[in-house]
Amino acid sequence: MKLSLFAFTASAAALLAGSAMAGDYHKNGTLLCSQCHVMHFSQSHGYQPNGSGFYLPPQGAAPHHYLLRDEINNLCLSCHDASGFAPDVLGASNTGNGPTDIREAGFLNRLGLPGADGLEYTGHTLDSTSTAPGSNPAWSNPDGLNCTNCHHQHGSGGSGHPDGGNQYRNLRSNPGNGTQRWVTYNYDTIGTNNLAKDVFERQTAEYDEDDVDLNEPDTTKSAVANWCAGCHSNFHGAVGGPEVGGVVFGAGFEEFVRHPAGGVNLGALGGGHSSLSQYNLHTNKVKVMSSAGVWNPAGSDVTPTCVSCHKAHGNGNAFGLIFRQGTGTKNENGDTPGNQLEDLCGQCHVQANYFFQNP
């Protein structure tokens, strides 16, 4: 077992290091069948004539569906939890290929893990059978939430994808109850922004939040929010619609019934609404969308969306919220001074200054 796992680790590390592809892993030239599938559930050596080379021994007492080497979550986590050569997505401890990264999506928790990493309140929870909050109709995975409920294992963006199937982070095009939920990114021009794409990646297969920013090619809505709405449909919708609400007020809207995740620019209204100057006051900013591709200092075009407030996988805070006060050292929970919800609200709303003395 030790030899085979070593071979798996060494080979996978070499594959990652030697890959010159654009975009993300598990796609095109890095879609390697043998990393996940085994034909007879009996493999005991590698694929070289002398028996060496990559392989992960089949796990468990009986074969798995789709010829998988292990149950879905265990299989994904064999690379994506403390492997040292792939992004570590599980738990607060980051011992993946970017141990100093502030992971853009934060980290998952999982039922049965000890301590905080096993709680079901701080983000997406692997193996959970709970109904997705805001899902309409109600959606859950009766077998427990798994990685492929959100990510497509083969990197497919689905039929009709506007960008040749190149979906950001291999996200499924049909999460939950959704269909054709597309999120595009600059897979073919990594490091050079394309404002027609939803996401700007500065480096290939990098997951630090400083390597990713959000464009806004359609200023009336957010592709990220539309994707999240596949499971959390009641939380998302057009401004003025039944889900989000909003009443026309001057050049903008007010009286929302849920926080908008698109179509409303920071500082569009003065007074007791959001404040662009408040947002720009902070050194440590949460992510917002920009139609101009300018985030620091942000212009009047910037718009918050789901991942402005929540880490997509989760973090150490309830609901995966980002308690970012705006100073100190950034981290996945927000930053070092941030310790309360009002630190997040204070990113955009001046009221937090009055009551909590946030900068």
Image (tube, rainbow, N blue to C red):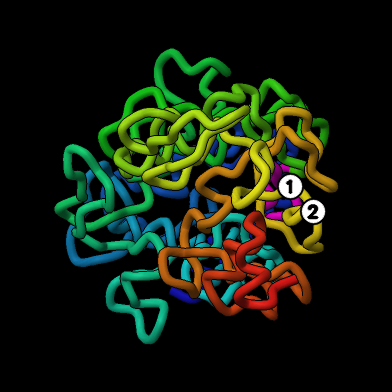
- The residue labelled by disc 2 is 280
Give the SS element for disc 2: helix
- In the rendered view of the protein, which quadrant contains the C terminus? bottom right
Q: Residue at x 41, y 41 (%)?
A: 228
Can residue 15 be seen here? no
The image position of residue 230, as x and y in percent, is: 34, 36
Real-space Cα separation, disc 1 to disc 2, in angstroms: 6 Å
Q: Is residue 357 left or right of residue 241?
A: right
The amino acid type of the residue labelled 2 equals Asn
Identify whether 43 is placed above or below 4: above
Residue topped by disc 1: 276
Q: Is residue 258 magenta?
A: no
Q: Is residue 228 above or below residue 182?
A: below
Percent across and percent down for residue 41 are: 27, 53
The answer to which of 68 and 261 lies nearer the viewer is: 261
Residue interval drawn in magenta: 204-214
Residue type beneath disc 1: Leu
Q: Name the quadrant of the N terminus.
A: bottom left
